[in-house]
Amino acid sequence: INSIMKAEINSNGTKIAYLEVVNYGEGKVLRLANSSPAGLTDLGEMKTTDYDYKTWYSFSGDEIVILNNTSGYNYTGEVRNTADFSVISQLKFPDRFVPIAFDSRNKQAVLKYGYSGGYDYGYFVDMKTSGIEKTIPYLGDYRSRYLISGGIVMSGNGRFLSVNELKQE
């Protein structure tokens, strides 16, 4: 039996993106569908890993921005067209760096090293420009998510920092 893990509806209610378990232990599928009173009409799908917390997605106008875990601690960022789910752009993130903050509106993400210890830097990713810049490192569990909006990264405890202050010179 298939089950939906999480879903998001676009701002005008005509599209739905949902993460579905097809066969437990074999990964999940992110699907995009048209939504109408008559039901759902699939537009496309992509395979993801078996861990739903490792797949990030959100609508941004006529696009959907996806941070997809391809294997282990490896990710890609994709921008897809919501009309047909075709790939507009794709960016491979540096190996073993995982997203901890995601701004779908501005197509930006902050990455941290996925293992304990490791590097003394992280990355800021701008999927609009395909830019990847080093930042100061983030501490804590990679499963902790932060908010990023309007160039500000915010944590759950109320602390915040400008993205420009994160970037290393």
Image: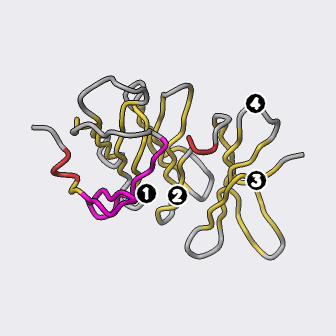
* First-in-chain label (1 vs 3): 3
On residue 104, the disc is 1
On residue 26, the disc is 4
Q: What stretch is highlighted in magenta?
A: 143-160
**Rendered view: 45 above or below 91:** below
On residue 4, the disc is 3
**Which amino acid lies under the numbered mark 1 shown in the image of this protein?**
Ser
**Which amino acid lies under the numbered mark 4 shown in the image of this protein?**
Glu
Give the left or right position of residue 164, taking residue 11 as reference: left
What's the image's color scheme? secondary structure
Per the model, the C-alpha gap separating discs 4 and 1 is 27 Å
Q: Name the residue under label 2.
A: 58
Give 14 or 73, whichever is nearer the viewer. 73
* First-in-chain label (3 vs 2): 3
**Rendered view: 23 above or below 3:** above
**Does the magenta segment cover residue 149?**
yes
Q: How crowded is mark 2: few (under 14 residues within 10 Å), some or many (20 or more)?
A: many
- Is there a contact, CB below 8 Å, between mark 4 and mark 3? no
